[in-house]
Amino acid sequence: KRKAIYMSNSNFPGVWSWDNAFNALALAGVDDELAWDQIQLLFDYQDDKGQIPGSISDSTIRWNFSKPPVQGLFVLKMMEKMTLTTEQLEKIFTQIRRHVEFYLRYKDFNGDGICEYHHGNDS
């Protein structure tokens, strides 16, 4: 659906949920449209519970691991270098809110308000 930047064609052939946020930040203020696409790539696949895939490629969507919702911090940093429209802000706010709610609802296994990770690929 969008142009994607892979971190490595040979070792990481796909878009990974944290790596694309770094790519988006690097592109902000240089190529704002491509920066927006990088932050949106995984949100295009956000599920009904609010989770985004751990990674996607041209052949695979990986749901087995989910990284914490760091995109809000990256979007704030991107906004120091580029201007988002009201429509973009409303969209990303809703997407990030749903992702954070997923973590609070489904990753806090003992209900103490702190999310847990049971595998290193989750964090």
Image: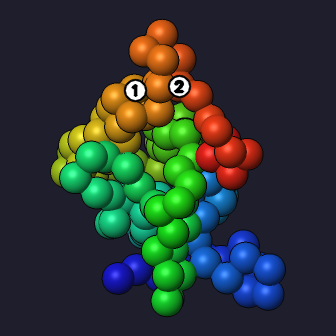
Q: Is residue 76 visible?
A: no
Q: Residue furthest right?
A: 11
Around disc 2, counting alpha carbons within 10 Å, would you say few (fewer than 14), some (14 to 19), or many (20 or more)?
some
Point out residue 76 in the picture as x, y percentages from the top left corner: 49, 36
**Which of these two is toward me, 74 or 8?**
8
Instruction: Residue type at mark 2: give it.
Output: Cys
Tell me where residue 123 appears, x and y as whole percent. Answer: 66, 41
Q: Residue furthest front?
A: 110
Image quadrant holding the N terminus, namely bottom left
Tell me which corner region of the image, top left, top right, bottom left or bottom right, holds residue 27. bottom right
Please name the residue shown 62% across and 35% down the image.
117
Q: Quick one: label 1, few (<14), some, or many (20+) residues within 10 Å? A: some
**Measured from the top left, where is residue 109 in percent x and y?**
47, 25
Please say if 42 is above or below 50.
Answer: below
Tag 1's secondary structure?
helix
Residue named by callout 2? 115
**Is residue 102 in view from this perspective?**
yes
- Give the percent coordinates (x, y) of residue 51: 38, 50
Alpha-carbon span between mark 2 and mark 1: 7 Å
Q: How many marks?
A: 2
Which residue lies under the disc numbered 1? 104
**Which residue occupies the foreground of this view, 83 or 43?**
43
Image quadrant in which you'd find residue 45: bottom left
Residue at position x 67%, y 82% from top?
13
Question: Nearest the camera: 3 or 45?
Answer: 45
Residue under the image location 51 percent in, 69 percent down: 62
In the image, is 95 to the left or to the right of 58?
left
Q: Report the disc number at residue 81.
A: none
Marks 2/1 in contact by CB < 8 Å: the verdict is: yes
